[in-house]
Image (cartoon, coloured by chain):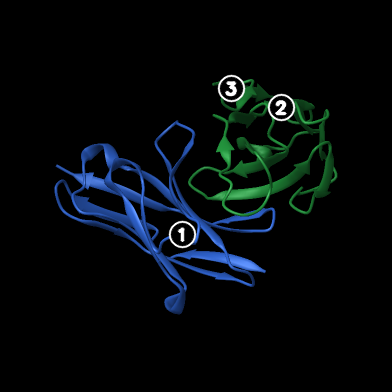
Amino acid sequence: AQSVTQLDSHVSVSEGTPVLLRCNYSSSYSPSLFWYVQHPNKGLQLLLKYTSAATLVKGINGFEAEFKKSETSFHLTKPSAHMSDAAEYFCVVSSDYKLSFGAGTTVTVRA
Amino acid sequence: GAGVSQSPSNKVTEKGKDVELRCDPISGHTALYWYRQRLGQGLEFLIYFQGNSAPDKSGLPSDRFSAERTGESVSTLTIQRTQQEDSAVYLCASRLRAGGSNEQFFGPGTRLTVL
């Protein structure tokens, strides 16, 4: 069995400040982990994925995530938020064929 | 190259009518998934296809929902006797192969509104 918990349903940051989106997972297997972003009225887009090659994963648009097995976490960060980062973010765990999605974190960016 | 496409993009129907939603996956992708996303909520897994067989239908909410896939190509999700609670965005995704770190590529979704 596998599951994902996104610890914050809503995160609000000022433009230019860091963003932290928290994700904890549980999995019976060595998981693959993903972060997806969904902009309003747009499709889901892959931000980054963990493939066991490196624990610190860099993605698109300046985002990165660190896999911490001891903490079963895969938190997403960005050093400096931009207005265009306002969106819904989903943490996803995959083992075998099935992907399990977190409930999502809505990010708002204040000017 | 072409991504995952879905049609129609929007569908408005009356309660009790049947609807059919279509998904064209990326060519060569063997795995295909359907999800439902209600307003303001996360993705709810409906069904998984490997080729044209569906080893996991556990997410289909009732026997009004069914899906099929032709080979490793088009899939259709059919909802019979639609109800207002079926209103949602229905997302299709495909993967080169199931498992591991293979990325799921999502279509733009079909927004279904049941009046």
Residue at image coords 63%, 69%: A29
Quadrant of the snapshot with the C terminus of chain A: top left
Colour of chain B in the rendered structure image: green
Please state the horizontal and vertical placement of residue B22, each as a whole percent of the image.
71, 25
Please state the horizontal and vertical placement of residue B71, each as a whole percent of the image.
83, 30
Real-space CA distance between mark 3 and mark 1, rounded to the nearest whole angstrom: 38 Å
- Chain under callout 3: B
Question: Which image quadrant is residue B16 in?
Answer: top right
Mark 3: secondary structure: loop
Q: Is residue A69 left or right of residue B15?
A: left
Mark 1: secondary structure: loop
Mark 2: secondary structure: strand
Of the numbered discs in the image, which one, if any, rests on residue A53?
Answer: 1
Question: Which image quadrant is residue A23 in?
Answer: bottom left
- Chain under callout 2: B
Residue at image coords 48%, 46%: B40
Most foreground residue, A75 or B67? A75
Of the numbered discs in the image, which one, if any, rests on residue B21?
Answer: 2
Please state the horizontal and vertical placement of residue B69, each as a whole percent of the image.
81, 32
The 10 Å Cα crowd at callout 2, few under 14, some 14 to 19, many 20 or more, is: many
Q: Which residue type does callout 3 highlight?
A: Ser
Q: Is residue A76 left or right of residue B39?
A: left
Q: Which residue type does callout 1 highlight?
A: Ala
Quadrant of the snapshot with the N terminus of chain A: bottom right
Residue at image coords 78%, 54%: B58
* Chain whose colour in the figure is blue: A
- Chain under callout 1: A
